[in-house]
Amino acid sequence: MAGSLLQKQRMQYKPQVPVWLSEDVCFETVGGSQAPENLRPLFPHTFETPVYRLRKGRGAARKVTIGVVFSGGQAAGGHNVIAGLFDSGAQLIGFLGGPQGIIDNQTKALLQIDAYRNQGGFDLLGSGRTKIETQEQLAASLKACTAHRLDGLVIIGGDDSNTNAALLAEYFLQHGCKTVVVGVPKTIDGDLRSSDIEISFGFDSACKTYSEIIGNIARDALSAKKYYHFIKLMGRSASHIALECALQTQPNLTLIGEERRPLKEIVRQIAELITRRAELGKNYGVVLIPEGLIEFVPELTDLPHEKDPHGNIEVSKIQTEKLIIDLVKKELGGRKWNALDHFLGYEGRSCLPTNFDANYCYALGKLAFFAVRESLTGVICSIQHLKESPQKWQFKMIPIVQLMHLEWRLGKEKPVIRKTLVDLKGSAYLKFSSQRKSWELEDLYQMPGPIQFFGDPALTDSVPISLM
Ligand code: FBP
């Protein structure tokens, strides 16, 4: 078996899921869809899909063949979704390179997945960002699923990928295709959320990886006492990652895009922070900047930006941290101070998943299997009570169309899943805003250290602070 000692040890980890998941289970309907009425004409076959709850009981006794695909950016734990499907007894066919692999019918049979258990990344299959929307793409996808006689297609993805899932489910029903389509909520961004989806997988591992590095940088700042570190954090649009990392590490200043503050005000605030800290003899500090800030600051939104196939601004390519440093330098005129910029992004998407993500993903894989076995389509997996131990988790399938609305993308109005932004009245933000003032001048940095896999469960099984 290839891999480092830790990789190999992690392969042996047995994800924790409720004991009753290995018994006979079935779904019951627990409520109608809350989908917006203006989507009814676009989703005539899936609009009325209800919400289902998984419970003990006799389910369908049949063997199923499932196609599985990773879609969009990597997020730690994805391989465990596949492990959950695999261990449930599905015959698995992986589509290669993301949604384009479905269209082009590029596949591999998944007969052995042990080397990928509890491992980061999506390298078992690769991933991609193709938007499936044209008649040709939809027809090619149907052809591939039919050719493999798939009972189900499981799409492991974020908001845009699950939009693909909703469109495919509708199209397949319209064309009499028996393949059901099931989504799994993935994305480090943490913006695929609803009252039923508490968090997407990958968020916890990414935030813990970034928080380790931020904590290390803070301690370096505290030791050398000569640099301001401006750290841009990945997380398109929403600032969930910046908020979680702020709660984990308590930096001097964290910008939150959703506060929608003018650029001038942000620059002035940072300049004042630097001046006030200098008066205390502190010429160092840590500032967190969410990459999605660009989408909320009026002076920055209007600039021309590159967009991905789904119409999202490619914010990772924009060096907001450098821009802000330059503007603060201008604001401070001749004052001497030193700034360093960092971008934490890709290093958090493919790390070894935390126990939380390893357990969550394995359970999501099992849930997706049951959904296919029971022929549910156009639905996304939801596991609730995630801050409790896995034995207390509850499982549902939510109609994807319920999460959607019409939005302008690339010059057209399109049905897409609404990204969930940081709630400025939510408990995570309120906790942050009640403490952040004290972090400005006092150095109350926290150093969370690396993700822990062995030892005290308080360390190994901790959940995101945003969930508490
Ligand atoms: P998903 O929404 O597909 O999970 O991807 C999110 C993300 O990691 C963002 O945080 C980031 O802005 C973007 O992907 C980077 O995209 P790419 O991997 O194409 O460079």
Image (cartoon, grey):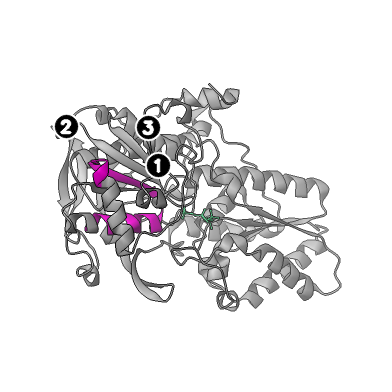
Q: In which quarter of the image is residue 212?
A: top right
Q: Identity of the amino acid at label 2?
A: Arg
Q: Identity of the amino acid at label 1?
A: Lys
- Nearest to the eye among marks 2 and 1: give it: 2
- Nearest to the eye among marks 2 and 3: give it: 3
Determine which residue is flagged by label 1: 387
Residue 66 magenta-highlighted: no
Disc nearer the start of the sequence (2/1): 2
Mark 1 within 8 Å of ligand 1, using the beta carbon:
no
Disc nearer the start of the sequence (2/3): 2
Residue 105, position as x, y percentages in the image: 36, 46
Magenta residues, start to end: 146-170
Q: Is residue 82 above or below residue 329?
A: above
Q: Identity of the amino acid at label 3?
A: Leu
Determine which residue is flagged by label 3: 110
Determine which residue is flagged by label 2: 62
Q: Which mark is residue 128?
A: none
